[in-house]
Image: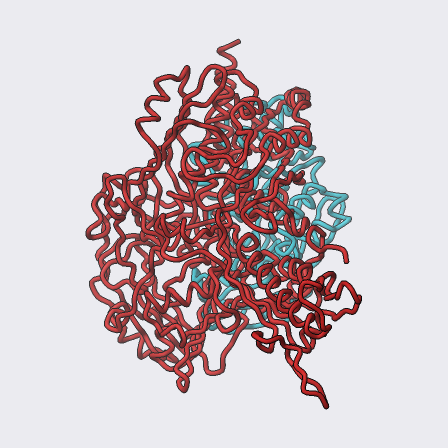
Amino acid sequence: MASLVGSRVERKEDGRFLQGKGRYTADINIANQTYAIFVRSPHARAKIKSVDTSKALKSSGVVGVLTGKEIAEDKIGGLIAGWAIRSEDGSEMKVPANPPLAKDVANFVGEPIAVVFAETLDEAKEGAEKVKVDYKVLKAVVDPADAMKSEAIHDGVDKNLCYDWLLGDRKAVDEAFAKADKIIKVDLINNRLVPNAMEPRACVVDYNTASEEITLYTTSQNPHLSRLVMSAFGGVAPENKLRVVAPDVGGGFGSKINVYNEEIVCSWASKKIERPIKWVAERTESFLTDTHGRDHVTHAELAVTKEGKFLGFKNETIANLGAYARVFGTVTPTYLFGPCATGVYVIPAAYSNVKAVYTNTAPVDAYRGAGRPEATYTIERLVEKAAMELGIDKTEIRMRNFPTEFPFKQTLVHTVDSGDYVAGLEKAKQMADYAGFEARRKKSEANGKLRGIGVSSYFEACGIAPSAAVMSLGCGVGLWESAEVRFNPTGQISVFTGAHSHGQSHQTTFAQIAADELGVPMENIDVVHGDTDKGTFGMGTYGSRSLTVGGIAIVNACKKIVAKGKRVAAKMLEVNEDEIEFKDGEFVALKSNKKKTIGEIAFACYLPGQRDEMKSPIPEGDEPGLIESSFFDPANFSFPAGSHICEVEIDPETGNVKVEKYTAVDDFGRIVNPMIVEGQVHGGIAQGIGQALHENTQYDETGQLMTASYMDYTMPRADNFPEFNLGFTCTHATSNPLGVKGCGEAGAIASPPTVMNAVIDALGGQEISMPATAEKVWKACKTLKKSNAKAA
Amino acid sequence: MKTFNYHTPKDVKEASKLASTSSAFLAGGMTTIPSIKLGLATYKDIIDIKSIKKLSGIKVSGKSVTIGATTKHAEVAASKEVQKTIPALAKLAGNIGDAQVRNRGTIGGSISNNDPSACYPSACMALNAVIHTNSRKIPAEKFFTGMFETALKKGELVEAVEFQVPEKADYQKHPNPASRYAIIGVFVAKHKKEVNVAVTGAKSCVYIDKDLSKKLSSSFSSSVIEGMKVDDSEMNSDMHASSEYRANLVSLYAKKAVEAC
């Protein structure tokens, strides 16, 4: 049987999604349900003097109104920060309380204050308009760079500083800098982004008054983790009385990792009003309250010799957490950022210092890449600038500093198990026709256009797992993953995974690997996820971990099935177990060539006996049935890497930037389904080009979100992209038996610096911040023209 | 969404009678419906004029092209007659919004709303259009009176727009990257006796740039306006574009339009 791993199997999901048969949370309706509308703060920072619900309660169709007062009285817990980060001075990070409904102070526009339940959506909206909140508006803290000098917005959080974290050795860095021929410096802003999942957040809660069980249907990337958090910290219900179902979910990009206010409030309230509740976010609510991404202000320096050897690296960053610290909010700008900031290079000394601050803006958390895009942008801008200032070719300077031996002990934390950075960059150069760029540049110039080329070499640490490692760094949970493989008596197989697909094609990829392990057609396999009542447990999908952690748990559970199958087959075929070989779904007795298919074995496991004879196929010490589970906790992260090359053409009259060519060469280890991986890379690059050229989240000085709709927030569209030119190199990961590495975030990690390096190259080295919008570029072109005129 | 009375009058007379200070005419609904949904506007009566046959269609006579108020952008863009007589107008219609908007949005709705970034008002100004309403004929320069404001009175309904066929014309737009409305749009029309350069997106209301029009009237060549500075004192300045940038674009896109004529 040909291996399915490695082949372009069409997606099992596509049929139903393309026919509109997806079943999302908003598609679920429960008889007798009420509709929830949240009353949200219109102010970025305000004292809540009083909340008057009397008129709302009398409004037509209103079933109930609840506020921060009631939720506090019921001792329902708030939202949590999932990672505890320590400051350089050893002190613990400062985390303010984040109640699900704000009672005393509102800290960002959109923060929920009260909730109205009514018989219809319109009645809920009417009712919400009648809730009168008396605010005392306070001066908002908006700009992260000013936050430490501003009035503290949370009690007990001096200077609005959550932590002042250091990784690395300042002294060693100073010594390295003292030896340098040149110090390269950059000041960077990593622009804040709104994740913009196609499906807005939603929840439907059904409280069963008889069993006292709450069922929460929600838009989550990790339903088991949501249940754990809501039970352990929220106190909404005991874990065994709370079922969380994340059905089809239309994109997350990190924004659906968190347990949000609305899920806690509706779950708690459903029990209180003894009615089912439905809440679906409107797009404006998504803009205002989904966790945002990035938002760093960075100063970084690279010490180099005149030959272009890197000696030392320093990174001073202010990270904006927004109003509250959320699940991955505190780790994204520290352990997911700092260690990767030295990039794919041998740098003897380095440090990253991050000050995380609170501001009166939406909370910032993981967004596709989470910390690694910021890290890659920092180092790759420095490297490109170093090449320019030293007059060394931008690919050559990278080659001179790549490690050539693996495992590669990276400066700050990681030991990278495998890779070949030289091969990746060589291949990218060839595919991008790097050598032919100068001719293309001249051609553009003849047409009055400016052409630039940018390179970026990246690695990232993903497949976020090793529990002992992440917990030692402050993570509140272990990041293993579980799987259960259930062989049914008739030969159909259910594979339960704790990973969650919200666009990642798990139904296909996981079926491919299970089919190969079990030697059955993939049509016989159903991949089940997203329901805490189905499957053991799960930590969910983020950090490109589904295949490298969850997929391996499936492989291991399948191996246990095969092991048991061998024992049963040996007994049935009356041979020793070591005389049985399993191949292509058949257990073969090597000497006699007698065989049993895996389906026959499953059947026998469930029906262990026969007519007229007292005989069981189950060996002594084994039990009937054919179900196996596995919890996989890898020994290391996975480290995808690669090199991307971009060419842009700028029209100096308008400042319009056109991405002319984009080449990406990535090393994701063994690839299970190339078509799906290419799709992941395409999506990541699209989001990265979005960050580099289009997307920007802007608050005004009072903390109002100016870009709260698609009229003002620029989402990249198909006509903003060229055809992506993709290539792969392959070095197997050594930390898992499939040799796979994560691929979900790489595109978004590598592409912003690649595009910006190209834009800055076209602008003759002039620094410009993301997004490189037409007007900014136009102004830079005018400056360039002036300086060229002077030089002439 | 607040409830409202929904009417489907059979003719213009009935539609006009239904109108009040708290009513809105609905054709494509490309602005009205989002405004209601977002709570920016509430109406007691919505008067849907889509089924009034007389209001839709394209007529071409020697000197003019007359487009019915409820004619959709996609119909104008695809019209062989418009493409032949005023290709710039078909091009403009074909670049409004996206396919969904073009399949619902109408010319009457666009000009009655008079969004400062809408495309059609610039064509009306440059092509000396006459707006036919149920009670009178209004020349374009008197029709567009301010930001989201027109000369239309209560109960007055646009029935058709009559464009003067120019010798040459072209429309150039620099779209807002987010909404794809015009950051600025320039409609240049060369008529027998004069050249009109109408600009949308740059100020609170569409206008004729007199300096550019005058220069081009004297000699219809892009060289006469090459690098010409446009006064930016009244121009919009927002997070999408500064007035300085808009002024640069007006001059540049006027040049591009002349070159494309």
| Quadrant position of residue A36 | bottom left
Picture quarter with the N terminus of chain A: bottom right
The percent position of residue A3, horizontal first and vertical second, equals: 73, 55
Residue A654, can we see it?
Answer: no
- Which of the two residues, B218 or B44, is positioned nearer the viewer here? B44
The percent position of residue B261, horizontal first and vertical second, equals: 70, 33
Residue closest to the far bottom: A612
Residue at 62% x, 70% y is A494
The percent position of residue A736, horizontal first and vertical second, equals: 56, 50
Colour cyan belongs to chain: B
Whether residue A376 is situated above or below residue A580 in the rendered picture? above
| Quadrant position of residue A281 | bottom left
- Which of the two residues, A489 or A391, is positioned nearer the viewer here? A489
Whether residue A113 is situated above or below residue B207 in the rendered picture? below
| Quadrant position of residue A22 | bottom right
Whether residue A248 is situated above or below residue A436 in the rendered picture? below
Residue at 54% x, 18% y is A392
A52 left or right, relative to B146: left
Colour red belongs to chain: A
- Which of the two residues, B196 or A658, is positioned nearer the viewer here? A658
Residue closest to the far right: A593
- Which of the two residues, A406 or B88, is positioned nearer the viewer here? A406
Residue closest to the far top: A792
